Image (tube, helix red, strand yellow):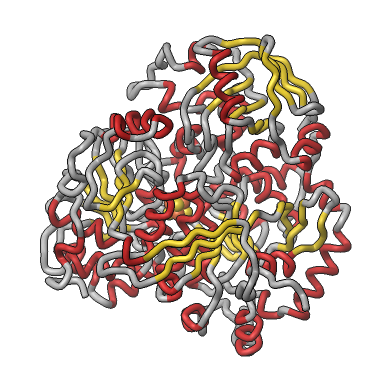
Amino acid sequence: MAGWTRHKGRAVFLGLDNIDTDQLIPARFMSTPRAQGYGQFLLHDLRNDADGAPDPDFPLNRRPDASVLVSGRNFGTGSSREAAVYALVDAGFRAVIAPSFGDIFAANAVNNGLLPAQVTDEAQAELAATLGTGTADISLDLETRTVAVGNLTVAFDLDESWRTKLVNGWDDIDLTNRHVDEISAFAANRAKSEPWAFPLTSE
Amino acid sequence: MAAPRTMLDKLWDAHEILRREDGVSLLWVDRHLVHEGSHHAFAKIAARGLKVVRPDLTFAVVDHYAPTLDRTKIADPKIARMIGTLRDNAQAHRLRLFDLQDQDQGIVHVIGPEQGLTLPGLSINCGDSHTSTHGAFGALAFGIGATEVAHVLATQTVWQRKPRTMRITVNGTLGPGVTAKDIALNWIAALGTGGAQGHAVEYAGSAVRALSMEGRMTLCNLSIEGGARLGMIAPDETTFDYLKGRAFAPGKGWEKAVTAWSALVSDEGASFDREVVFNATEIAPTVTWGTSPEQALPVTAAIPDPARLDPEKAKAADAALEYMGLQPGRPLDGTPVDQVFIGSCTNGRIEDLRAAAAVLAGHRAKVPGLVSPGSAQVKAQAEQEGLDVVFKNAGLTWASSGCSMCVGMNGDQVAAGKRCASSTNRNFRGRQGPGARTHLMSPAMVAAAALTGTITDVRRFLGERAA
Ligand code: SF4
């Protein structure tokens, strides 16, 4: 995963709260291998009618070039399916801006280079008002933790460890393997002090 | 004297290998549970040429795609491939697999406890948000995404920032026909789906203490629907009684283990970042009317009128009512349903089936429905008790265990526009199938809905039948 510090793109507003992971990617698409691309499944049942025809008024259909999504509260609530993040990333998104996020979704996002930028309700309302039903150029800066659209600049919240990870494009397995000795020592200790914590299938 | 510690503090300290300068901890993982949906994670480690580092602590189960009606042949090639991939990965990494024909197969959050893989004081991870269920035993259990699953497979550890603490205390005694499901839907309705965001919720109070392990699991299971990272309940005699003699529970070391587990309580005077108190006597059987678990009300209430809600909630309520096809102001009780579902990791355990069967016994359901036990063991136990006969005589379909209609991945779906009274955990749009309309409620309430073909206050049938 490549790291990034600044992004310039187009932002679109999707004015719904509680967009859950079942809406981000309906379960029936989740058996698809990632190589086939998950962008086609993003918000599938909201974007398309029952027969699969795209709703021309849905914001993402009107603005397929968008790379930043401004949305409502509790974005990504629900299941741990990382496929919800794959759908956004494969559809070209680099950031979601919302007043709050589902915890597991936000962690999954960072693990895939997608920024979950948390803003205040007021800032979200200002961004929404600026965007309306159109799109606008937007720039994001992980260094200053700010988003700028036209004359409007708002700050976003992002856990410091997540910021570092996004900027460096770090892979956790590599990081963790530097601690392999501490991990082995911990495991050996635990087996001695809490033997009940290890399955005793032989007994 | 050391400062008083919460249960979370104790569990966290026991698993923290190290803490980075930025405050993120590297935690040891005692049990890692995987299922068909873990295929992305296995692909990730395969791409790097890595193996599962602790196959002895990793357990695999077929549940999300498990066929529930006919297991002899799987018609849908996509489903067959998902199950086949898990089998291949389990074999390649030498993992214990609870496969379709296994007498111990079931939903991952049902079989973990049932097998004694879930124990107090353990850290448990699974690529599934309802991993919070296992916290009912006093375990540190939370769901993770595919990248983290790959990380656990490769290192048996997980990076995590310690959540804030929140204690939900439920005092008093639950009324007849009121269950753990109602406690959960009630607090989520009161605090919202973001109500516990970023927090580890510890449940306490006399009403929680009085719950069986099944009830405690239901409560912890639903923590995630209120935004919590995890749920937990301090272990006690109820916990130990449930676990004693389970296949993977300690045998010889039992007494020592119980001594260690008994210390897993929040110390007197330990402080929580947030405290909320509820009164059990005020909780009624609760039903969701919308498309988010927070859109829930006592069954005695009327369907809300968005015009009378605060504007923040009005828009969501409007959209939800339209999707659900409901009229504002009409009583919830009496809303016709097309079908029912009893099952899932929330309410697919033996006690849930008993509660539903007690309501149904000797009667015919007015609408069709599916009953999918949470595990093969639950199924066998229910059959021994004759519960299957009660369901079948009522006209419901008695199926095998799996996630089934909770998520519809195996093909058990609610058709578009149909309304289902369901013992599951999510009423999201399309959760049970595209266009499906879901009303969450307790298993006894689902049984009552089956009998009348409408959403019904189960208390009407108490005394008459259910004990
Ligand atoms: S029963 Fe439903 S909530 Fe539970 S693990 Fe299966 S799909 Fe997830």
Q: Residue at x 32, y 62 (%)?
A: B282
Name which quarter of the figure residue B153 lies in: bottom right
Where residue A123 appears, as percent x and y from the top left, is 61, 25
Against A102, residue B67 (above or below) is below
- Is any part of residue B109 visible from this angle? yes
Up/down of B148 relative to A158, above or below? below
How far across and how far down the image is residue B296, in percent?
34, 47
- Asked which quadrant contains residue B93, the reply is bottom right
Q: Position of residue A103 (x, y in %)?
A: 60, 44
Q: Is residue B91 left or right of residue B288?
A: right
- Asked if B98 appears above or below A152 in the picture, the reply is below
Residue B67 visible in the snapshot: no
In the displayed structure, would residue A31 be above or below residue B101?
A: above
**Residue in the foreground of this view, choosing between B149 and B83:** B149
Give me the residue at 48% from left, 37% from top. Answer: A20
In this orientation, which residue lies closer to the viewer: B177 or B444? B177
**Rendered-image quadrant of the C terminus of chain B:** bottom left
Q: Is residue B30 left or right of residue B325?
A: right
At x 53% / y 69%, what residue is drawn? Answer: B233
| In this rendering, position of residue B431 left or right of residue B329 | right
* Residue B266 location (% of width, % of height): 62, 72
Given residues A176 and B393, the one toward you in this image is A176
Question: Which residue does the image show at 21% across and 70% down from the upper left?
Answer: B358
Decide which of A25, B5 is in the foreground and name it.
B5
Quarter of the image with the N terminus of chain B in it: bottom right
